[in-house]
Amino acid sequence: MKKVVVVLKVNGKSYELIIESHMLLGDVLRDKLGLTGTKYACGTGDCGACLVLIDGKPALSCLTLAVTAKDRDILTIEGMSEGGNLHPIQQAFLDNGAIQCGYCTPGMVLSAKALLDDNPAPSKGEVKEALASNLCRCTGYVKIVDAVLAAAKTMGKGGKS
Amino acid sequence: MEQELSIVGKRLPRADAPPRATGAMQFSVDMTVPGMLTGRILHSPYPHARIKKIDTSQAKEVPGVEAVITYQDVPKMPFTRSAMAEALPSFAYEGEVLDQYIISDKARYIGDWIAAVAAVDVYTAEQALDLIEVEYEQLPAVFDPFEAMKPGAPVIHEGKKKNIAGTISHAFNCGDVDKAFKESDFVVEFSGKNSRQKHCHLEPDSAIAFWDTNGRLTVISPCQNAHLAKKAFARRIFDMREGDIRWITPAVGGGFGARLAFGVEPLAAFLAKVACKPVKVITTREEDFAGWAARTEQYQTMRIGVKKDGTLTGIEMRIVSDSGAYFSHSGTITAVNMQHTLGLFRFPNVDAQAKIVYTNTPIASGFRGYGNAEGSFILQQCIDMLAEKVAMDPVEFRLKNIKKVGEPSFFIPVPLDHCQLEQCIRLAAGKIGWKKKWKGWGKEKPDRIKRGVGMSIMNHASGAGGFLLEHSSVLIKLNEDGSANLTVSPCEMGQGILGALSQIAAESMGLCYEDIHVVTGDTDVTLFDIGSHASRSTLVIGNAVIDAGNKIRKQLLDLASKQLGVAAAELDIKAGRVYAKSAMEKNISVARIAHDAIYNYMDKGAHISATGSFLSTSHNPNFQAAFAEIEVDTETGVVKLLKYVVAHDIGRAINPQSVEGQLEGGTAQGIGLALTEDFMVDAVTGRTLTDSFATYKIPSTLDMPEMDFIIVEDPAPKGPYGAKGVGEPGLVNVAPAVANALYDAVGVRISTMPISPEKVLAALKGK
């Protein structure tokens, strides 16, 4: 197994790592960096639990080779609440009761961030569309969609993006 | 008199939610233990095969491999995967079939466990799996339970003739059904089955296990009933003392009944024993799909008689349950189907029988709704067929035949003590606009896309008291600052039970909600509890919390009485202060009392603490009515659920936001069961065809209709502050309500789940 040295920029910090060239980004985040907020659930790109943002765009870390993410900006759920302050999207998930088991939450929150960065005032239909590839087995999505709409309102009022 | 409540009934945030939002919450699959090995499983490629020879010598030579096990190595005590069975009374436990070993002695389905490896990492473990040489003798296999019962069918478990693992005669059979049918004006018959729904909990199955030098075993896993799992491990699998097992349950990433049966825990424990190191067994989604938990498929035939005036005369039910390769929950889930389904309406004559049959397919198990969703799909369609026969409105027909308070209840033979079902039916019918939207029987609708409305009602137990050992014990201790540690042992798999129990604790003691700290997830610390299932936790554990809370309250009042010089009976506690009811200025903080009780230099010290227990001997039924409005495209067969209205009789909502969450989430799973979730085993090879989220379709945001949930509150006599259960019911009514709406729209009935476009088109063609 070929080992390579890569520099990954995760949540604003650079990490120099020696990894096998076939390693997936999700495994590197979880096993090498201890960032277990990125979840493993299907391994086949069907559920969105492992979703992270690379250069602001949603990416499934279970299908992404870690080496392809070098020198790019990777944002995981841990980077959403740095300094202990919850991001308005996270706060909205809490306020709206949008979290049950929480296993899909990191991917959902990051998907929502990608949406709101791109479209700060989405319609309900646009929120549903944007989150359609993030599966949740607990909530029935009602409160998740409500939370994203609520977050859009808060952020529109000058919350941090 | 209505109790004045300050914390119960409020939409309060769950203390365990923020770490789930930040990614900090650790699930079993996220956890590591120093020196831990990785365990992987070798699965059978054949549905039925004898293991003639198994050679692990090459696998053991791989550097980094520390344990390789086969059926020859594992303990020889047979067990059932259903840890819940430990809570059955002995007469019922005899109905359980102990038919499994940690590793199978013979392959009984594609995916059966043939060997396992523990190695330094997953790559090494998988390399070793490839080097295990197995010589199989392929045996004829059978994938259909009716074929399995025929003479000459392959025998899956020695000694089980016709592959019948067990039979069940319903405990409340009564009267003479044949006579009743003769005296009926109409008898309808309907046969169908539910699908083998997969739980699809997003957190995959995993387990970490390690043994310490004193021979004590620690298991870390997502488990819904850790205390029972501990007992089953001790008594049935490893022949050790319960006290020598510590079971840790971190946050659980969805359960839905899957974690009521063992996953990979026995394997992790045995690999760890052989390797003398901690082992974490991990699994993939593909393994899970072809694996060891899914809703038991029940083939059901119902016959029901009715008089012209709409009076039901009797019901006959026959069930054949496909348990798959091993017994697990297939017996109890079938019995519970009968208990729920046959008791909702007033049937003076009842005859129900079931057979549980082995096939060479993945293992069936328990699933949210536990028999009730399966039975309701058939029963509620029958009820509509009967209403049509006697030309009655389905709403009126149900109102005429549902049981009322005082009549025999359904789960165990006691009188029904609380029921708001009639209210639920009326409220939900009003909300959907039934009178306007339902046009009567047999009305042809124009246009390619046709609309229809349908309904379904249900009863469900809030804990299986009288059947299972519904025992919960809890511990509360007060800290020096007046906050309280609440030690409880439900399984928090997302339902919000820790929040609900915290609200109950704060209310019962008179503390602030924020001052409750929950301690949970470790059997070394928690008191006995049978875990979370059967919509039981709020009612049973909640009552145990009140028992402990009342004892703490008494201790606080006695100590405050001495300090304030006011009789205890004249005192009350609110928001963490004890005060005299007649003179509020006479007061003292709980913090002060708790602190001084411990830091007492004058007298014998005391730490304010109490245990509380509750044994529920009844089932405290909750009720629900649901209405679906759908659209059917008669050219494509696609059924679209437009609107879904539910009214649920909860007794009291401890936290309305969590109650809504349970109903919404249950409904989503019900929509999957009704319309898209179609677990398929190839009829020729026995291979699981649906082994990913790409091939097995659970609902996404785009599949959710407009929904309305009405929470009907009228405190139930035995609930904590009147609360009853809500964990499972959201799922139960969806498929039957949609099926009845389909009949209203296009006049066809679908008898098997899911109601797929193919089935709808075929039915329309055959009309």
Image: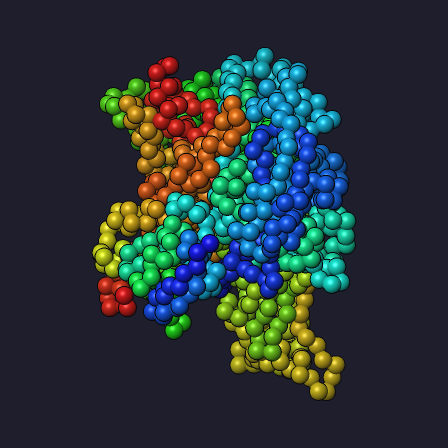
Query: Which color scheme is applied?
Result: rainbow
In the image, taking residue B70 as reference, residue B207 lies left or right, namely left
Residue nearer the viewer, B756 or B656: B756
Q: Position of residue B20 (x, y in %)?
A: 45, 60
In the image, taking residue B545 as reference, residue B288 lies left or right, namely left
**Quadrant that contains the N terminus of chain B:** bottom right
Could you tell me if residue B616 is visible in this image?
Answer: no
Residue placed furthest toward the bottom: B602
The residue lying at 72 percent from left, 80 percent from top is B605
The residue lying at 35 percent from left, 21 percent from top is B761
In the image, taking residue B59 as reference, residue B454 lies left or right, namely left
The residue lying at 63 percent from left, 24 percent from top is B139
**In the image, residue B715 above or below residue B368:** below
Q: Position of residue B407 (x, y in %)?
A: 60, 35
Q: Position of residue A132 (x, y in %)?
A: 33, 46
**In the image, residue B441 above or below residue B574:** above
**In the image, residue B40 above or below residue B500:** above
Residue nearer the viewer, B385 or B534: B534
**Quadrant that contains the C terminus of chain B:** top left
The residue lying at 53 percent from left, 70 percent from top is B515
**In the image, residue B229 above or below residue B248:** above
- Total numbered badges shown on the rendered structure: 0
Could you tell me if residue B274 is visible in this image?
Answer: yes
Residue placed furthest toward the top: B182
Q: Position of residue B162 (x, y in %)?
A: 67, 21
